[in-house]
Amino acid sequence: MSWIKAIILQANKSTLDKLSDNGNILLFNGSPVGGGDISGISFEDWTVGQQVQIVDDIPPLDPEVATISISNVQQTSLTLNWGQSASLDVSEYEVYKGGTIMATLAPPYSKFQFLEYKVTQLLPNTTYTFSIKAVDTSNNRSKGVSITTKTIGNRAIAMNGITDFLKLPSLTFTTIELKFALHLPIPVPSNVSIVDARSGIANAYYERSSNGSDNIGAGWNSIYINGVINQNIPIPNDVVTILQLNLSYAGTDDINIFSNSGGEQRAAGSIYYVKLFNNGNLVAYYDFTTQFIGSVVDDSSGKGSPAAILTGGTWITP
């Protein structure tokens, strides 16, 4: 049986009594009002027919832990996402960074709508813990659900187009996402490779040709540049770009970045990160926004994928 509190409304009575269920069980002239079983309930310092006031001190349920997530992580900002509490009397949600409240989100929003909040003014390469608490109409707060993440750093690895390239381990994927900037001579004296997965997947490559156009292998089902489907426009020089290459079905390859599968046709530019997904699920994340020592590039996805191998490269702050 769940219990709530009731305050006796009488000048010389300040003791808290207990009522059962949802607060509808009150005694007036010895009979329950609102229905319900009152057997086994003790009313301390209370007389039949005396008026009481219900006090709701039961906190609402937290949002489901599985629904809280973080998206669009940048150097100084990110977006928190979460599903709503199952409690019906929630009036708002509080967003905390560490133990400090940052924002309060109140309606209007629909009951089953996923909520989001953009966090700004963060520091690069810094770990943060965020919490979401539900607040009900009686100002009770849930314990809160938390999530920890790290903002991306302010570094990148520069590839010289002569000796430098990146080799990923053999992984099964449907999408590769590369954040980079090209620093190519104009015109390019010969074809250079940006992504090459042809060792395991037929015609899965993306390269810049000597005539200035981008050669795109037919192995890719769709291609997006900065979130826009490719319009056969060459990726510009010296512009930070997110290239997403999608297969129509899962394939396996040890992909080369900024070279072909043989380590030749090397491109000049800067790499920020490489991500691999399999049907929308992150498989591996190789991050170059935080400087490290050596040529072994560990997977930062938490999935335990093998490391990539970096040949050459120079750390820069773009």
Image (cartoon, rainbow, N blue to C red):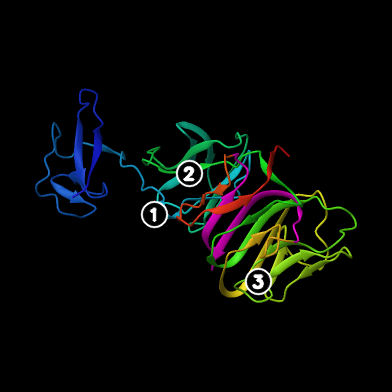
Q: Nearer the viewer, residue 253 or 88?
A: 253
Q: Nearer the viewer, residue 271 or 59?
A: 271
Q: Which residue is mark 2?
A: 92
Q: Earlier in the sequence, mark 2 or mark 1?
A: 1
Element at badge 3?
loop
User: Residue at 58% of width from left, 46% of height from top?
Assistant: 295
User: Residue at 60% of width from left, 42% of height from top?
Assistant: 152
Q: Which mark is residue 198?
A: 3
Between the residue at mark 3 and the residue at mark 1, the CA separation in whole angstroms equals 49 Å
User: Residue at 23% of width from left, 28% of height from top?
Assistant: 10
Query: Would you say residue 273 sits in the magenta stretch?
Result: yes
User: What span is in magenta?
Assistant: 265-291
Contact between marks 2 and 3 (CB within 8 A): the answer is no
Q: Which mark is residue 86?
A: 1
Q: Nearer the viewer, residue 104 or 240?
A: 240
Q: Earlier in the sequence, mark 2 or mark 3?
A: 2
Q: Local crowd at mark 3 within 10 Å, few (<14), some, or many (≥20)?
A: some
Screen quadrant of the C terminus: top right
What type of secondary structure mainly makes up the magenta span? strand
- In the shown orientation, is residue 107 left or right of residue 2? right
